[in-house]
Image: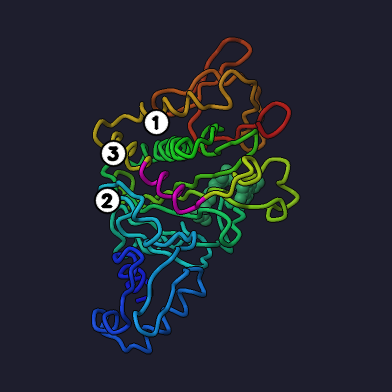
Amino acid sequence: MKEDVISILKENNGSYVSGQYLSIRLNVSRTAIWKYIKSLKESGYIIESSSKKGYRIISSPDLLTSDEIKPHLITKYLGHEIIHFDTLDSTNNKAKDIASKVGANGTVITSEEQVSGKGRLGRQWVSPKYKGIWMSYILRPHIEPIHVPKITHIAAAAVVAGLSKLNINAFIKWPNDIIVNGKKICGILTEMSGEINCIDYVVVGIGINANLETIDIPTDIIDKASSLLIETGKLIERKILAAEVINSFEELYEKFLNSGSIKDSIEICRKNSILLGKEIRIINRQHEETAIAADISDEGELIAEFSDGTKRKIISGEVSIRGLKGYI
Ligand code: BT5
């Protein structure tokens, strides 16, 4: 209901809307409207109240709600339904829960914080309140499960493209880390449910450290993790960046669905790769090898070249990649 009040106030572009009009249109009492307005003010909306004229909106907070993100979307379906939470364990878990019931293709789950944000292989993802963009997309592609890892490359390319709209130059540490000034500012976690030949749903989770400050980052990861605020010195409008990433994702994802190829995404991944040409350690369980990151194939595999000149394709998810001297 609060969302409906905000939509009506926004429809009126800063002009006054009477309490009576709101109460008739939403079929609730004027006291209820007053309570919604009070709660909206508490969550950061600046709303002017006049006993004669009613209410008018002056400004909106930077929240990851449907109302705040949707006006900036140019998508055909992605984000047309945004389900927003103040707090969650993990947006990926919530998205999987919703997808296993009715969640439509293109539904986006956002949360202001995650108390058990997840990385790959059961790792943790730090997700403090109001500081980042913690979002997951529900997708129902008609593709074979073997192609699902490609969606991580699409997401990585979409984050880089979204950041470039804000004039932020970012790099990709294949396959799922986004890097600014040598530090990780975003991670991607793609999960799926289905059978051998058929996907029920895919959930793409994207976590972007927008406005984290140094004290928000645990000391054990401070040497490799950072935020856009720390690296650029500028406060990021999370709703705008979230919308830009959603817009870029749908465009690249549609190209994939229509052509069966992720060439456009891979082009972005190659151009912005932080690994290509560098010496890397390929860590697969206990086994560790050194190679040069020679290329990324059109299918998204990392092509590693070994000292004897042989090359091998590495599939994302198979290994961890580290720079020779540290994280990159
Ligand atoms: C990832 O895993 O990078 C995937 C992260 C995906 C997070 C999103 S947020 C929305 C959605 N909902 C979820 O629950 N998850 C997704 P991985 O490559 O395994 O990296 C995890 C490692 O990154 C951790 O072990 C830490 O070392 C480091 N890390 C943890 N939190 C971080 C943060 N906020 N920023 C940068 N690095 C972090």
Front residue of 268/284: it is 268
Measured from the top left, where is residue 255 in percent x and y?
A: 29, 34
Q: CA distance from mark 2 to mark 1?
A: 19 Å
Q: Quadrant of residue 307?
A: top right
Q: Earlier in the sequence, mark 3 or mark 1?
A: 3
Identify which residue is drawn at 46% across, 56% down.
92
Q: Is 72 left, or right, of 220 in this rendering?
A: left
Q: Which mark is residue 77?
A: 2
Q: CA distance from mark 3 to mark 2?
A: 11 Å
Q: Earlier in the sequence, mark 3 or mark 2?
A: 2
Q: Is 58 left, or right, of 178 in this rendering?
A: left
In the image, residue 318 above or below residue 273: below
Identify which residue is drawn at 68% across, 55% down.
216
User: Which residue in the protein does label 3 denote?
Assistant: 254
Residue 155 covered by magenta stretch: no
User: In the rendered view of the protein, which quadrant contains the N terminus?
Assistant: bottom left
* Mark 2 residue element: loop
The residue at label 1 has a CB less than 8 Å from ligand 1? no
Q: Quadrant of residue 261?
A: top left
Residue 242 covered by magenta stretch: yes
Q: Which mark is residue 105?
A: none
Q: Residue furthest top?
A: 309
Neighbours of disc 2 within 10 Å: few (<14), some (14-19), many (20+): some
Q: Earlier in the sequence, mark 2 or mark 1?
A: 2
Measured from the top left, where is residue 126 in percent x and y?
A: 62, 55
**Which contiguous range is marked in magenta?**
237-247
* Amino acid type, callout 3: Glu
Is the C-beta separation of discs 2 and 1 under 8 Å?
A: no
User: Which residue in the protein does label 1 denote?
Assistant: 265
Identify which residue is drawn at 40% across, 51% down.
203
* Amino acid type, callout 2: Tyr
